[in-house]
Amino acid sequence: MKLRESQKADLVAAGKRYSSQYPESAAAQYMEHRGLGEQAEQFRVGYVSDPITGHEWYRGRLAIPYLRPAGGVHALATMRFRCIADECVKDGSGAYVQPHEEAHEKHAKYLTIPGHNPHLFNTAALLTSSTVVLCEGELDAMAVSGLGVPAVGVPGVASWRDHFDPAFAGLATTLVVGDGDEAGRAFTRKVCERLASARPIDLGDGYDANRFIVTYGKEASRERLGLAA
């Protein structure tokens, strides 16, 4: 869907509003749990406590803006909204569970704005280096960015589009990091078949990039990516 200028401005205003609602929110607590507190500020992550008109069904969700380098009314391509409800992300004692153990029943973990097509997350990374990491998911791309490595995310294994291919055409290396499950490995194989610069990285069963980094630390994670100093 091609957005009108007024819709683009509304989207930017919504992003700013949700970013202002983030400090000390449930979203901030969740991002700290994921080891992404610093990245949340960098990527202007938000929280929907007081939604704009039309965003009522995103109330209580983590807001993930797809930032563009352009700025102005073109500063946001879209936003996605992640469920962080206590009953879905915490156990009976009130402690956070691992992301792969979360239970999102009878609703989607992520919601996308109706009519918005899939986009690449953090496209600015494609302008900064000849080597980038391509992750399955926005939070994983944020986690890898915390290693000092340019990272791009895809919003789910089925979200790849033909027009994404040219964005990687000039790169020397694209490290493809899918989740450590059947769907994630199928995603990695699919992308590696499409991109000449692609190189698969398998983090092991049950691991996505975020979990691997939190578990093993930055140095080991960079080494696993083949980027150790």
Image: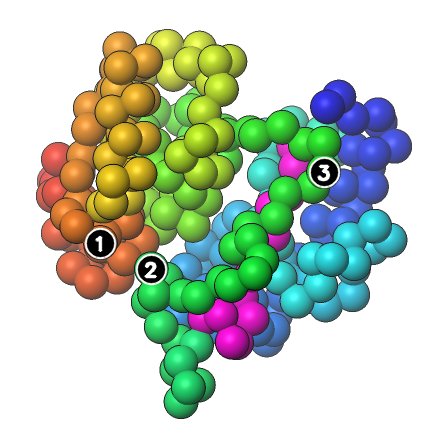
Q: Quadrant of residue 32?
A: bottom left
The amino acid marked with disc number 3 is Pro
Highlighted magenta segment, given as a residue range: 76-89
Locate the C terminus and report the quarter of the image it occupies: top left
* Residue sitting at the far front: 106
Q: CA distance from mark 3 to mark 1?
A: 31 Å
Q: Quadrant of residue 76?
A: top right
Front-most of residues 102 and 77: 102
Within the magenta stretch, is there residue 159? no
* Residue sitting at the far bottom: 93
Position of residue 21 measured from the top left corner of the image (x, y, whole percent): 69, 66
The amino acid marked with disc number 1 is Gly
Left or right of 103, for residue 75: right
Left or right of 106, for residue 70: right
Q: Quadrant of residue 27?
A: bottom right
- Mark seen at residue 64: none
- The answer to whether the residues at label 2 and label 1 have Cβ atoms under 8 Å apart is yes
Q: Which of the marked residues, 3 or 1, is nearer the chain's N terminus? A: 3
- Residue 111 in sight: yes
